[in-house]
Amino acid sequence: MIDIRPFDTLGHADHGWLDARHHFSFANYHDPERMGWGNIRVWNDDTIAAQSGFPPHPHRDMEIVTFVRSGAISHRDSLGNEGRTVAGDVQVMSAGTGIIHAEYNLEDEQTTLFQIWIIPDRTGDKPGWGQRAFPKATREGGFEVLASGMPDVDDALTIRTDAKVAATTLSTGQTAVWTTSPDRHQYLVAPTGRVRVNGVEAQPRDGIAVTDESEISVEALDDAEVVLVDAR
């Protein structure tokens, strides 16, 4: 099953400094038909104005993955972690028993990113944070796993949930294939470029919800980048 959620049907909140699109119910946007997809609870498509950002605020019991699409985001949290994550790279935060963090765009240009929340497999763990660079050249033409709750994925950032976050960069006409299990849930977004997923076409920034498939074939109709989450 493949369900396309067109970009213009997503929840929308414009706060001036933050222009956010919500793939699933979030904050003041509520759609009982879009409360999540499997264990994926939030997928926000955020544009953050230069020299602005999210002031310190708390989270608990959630795995939060930030994929930066352009610009950079600077992180600081109550554990003493600090870091700057640039376009194409990823940071993960395991909120665990509780963490306070701030995310600022300290650049002179806007930053765009996906913020993805995945429900953890268990609660009560200590909070944690991590980031790493993933050069786009390493994922050209095929999916690279960026974050994973599986112990057999080398080099990926660790998340505390039965899920994988992956990305691929495709030239027009290229295809990337993701192998999975029909009982799992996948959600894909191409921030740039039109794609065809198992024969179904999607526009840039559309949500693509998939289940009951053992193989997902993503064909680039334009030069495209694709972010995918495969969750229980």
Image: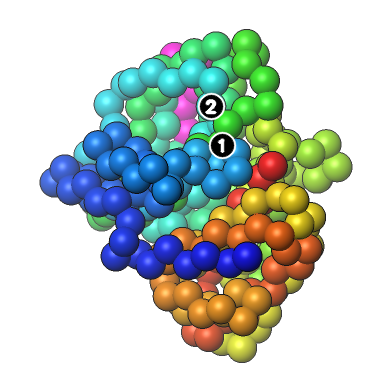
Residue 37 is situated, as x and y percent measured from the top left of the image, at 55, 47
Dominant SS in magenta: loop
Under mark 2, the amino acid is Met
- What segment carries the magenta color? 78-83
Is 176 on the left or on the right of 71, as rendered? right
CA distance separating discs 1 and 2: 6 Å
How many neighbours does mark 1 have within 10 angstroms: few (below 14), some (14-19), or many (20 or more)?
many
Residue 80 lies in the magenta-colored region = yes
- The quarter of the rendered structure image containing the N terminus is bottom right
Q: Looking at the image, which residue is at 50% across and 39% down?
A: 41
- Is 66 in the magenta? no
Mark 2 residue crowding within 10 angstroms, few (<14) / some (14–19) / many (20+): many
- Depth order, front residue of 213/106: 213
Q: Is residue 85 visible?
A: no
Q: Which residue is mark 1?
A: 118
Q: Is residue 73 above or below residue 12?
A: above
Relative placement, left or right, of 116 versus 186 is left
| Disc 2 secondary structure class | loop
Give the secondary structure at mark 1. strand
Residue 62: numbered disc: 2
| First of labels 1, 2 by sequence position | 2
Q: Position of residue 11 (x, y in %)?
A: 29, 51
